[in-house]
Amino acid sequence: MNKVLVAYFSTSGKTESMAEFIAEGVRFNGLNAIVKKMSEIKDPAQLAGFNGYIFGSPTFSLDIPWPVKTFLKLFKNGDLNGKLTGAFGPYLHDSSYHHADYAPDKILDLLQKDYKTERFDLDALCLREDILETRDGMKACQDYGRIFGEKLNK
């Protein structure tokens, strides 16, 4: 059975909520989705054995928060070459910003360039915080996980 790690960093609980909804979507395909706080993963060995990875992070000052950058360094010792990766996160920034300015897109770019992962076709899921709390927000997260799982099952 394919196994997906959904790891997240959250300060307000919004990213955590997204992680849980995305994991539900992954499970719709019969896959095993493990949800963990990034701070719970201390050793690169804890990252082994997964077929796919989805990382969640809010955006701080249009950048990846430091705890997430530290977490991603764990992968330097892991073999992510060719593994499917996705990213997600809430935002509350001015609407004039582009999604490429948000942490989830930056995370996917880093993983693809530095770790040679396979970038998920849907790119990163960035949801405005007020949408996250709605049925549409929950469905968007579940759909992201479901489609990720479908891609892994192919």
Image (spheres, rainbow, N blue to C red):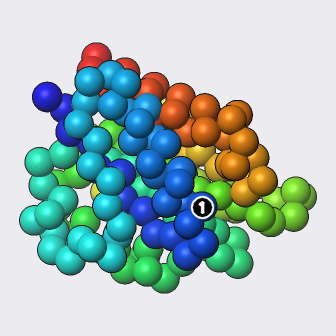
Q: Nearer the viewer, residue 30 or 59?
A: 30
Residue 121 lies, in percent from the top left, at 50, 31
Q: Position of residue 98 (x, y in %)?
A: 78, 54
Q: Position of residue 154 (x, y in %)?
A: 28, 17
Give me the residue at 36% from left, 67% from top: 37
Classify 128 as above or below 72.
above
Q: Measuring 30% from the left and 27% from the top, which residue is drawn there?
A: 152
Residue at which label 1 appears: 14
In the picture, the quarter occupied by the N terminus is top left
Q: Helix or strand or loop: what does disc 1 sit on? A: helix
Of residues 43 and 100, which is closer to you in this image?
Answer: 43
Residue 104 quadrant? bottom right
Residue 111: name its quadrant.
bottom left
Left or right: where does residue 55 sit relative to residue 152? right
Q: Is residue 99 left or right of residue 124?
A: right
Tell me the kind of residue under disc 1. Lys
The answer to whether residue 19 shows anywhere in this view is yes
The answer to whether residue 118 is visible is: no
**Is residue 50 found left or right of 126 in the rendered image?**
left
Compared to 89, does 147 lie above or below?
above
Q: Answer few, some or many: residues within 10 Å of disc 1's Cα (few below 14, many 20 plus, some between 14 and 19).
A: many
**Image height of 59 relative to 87, above or below:** below
Residue at (39% x, 41% y) in the render: 23
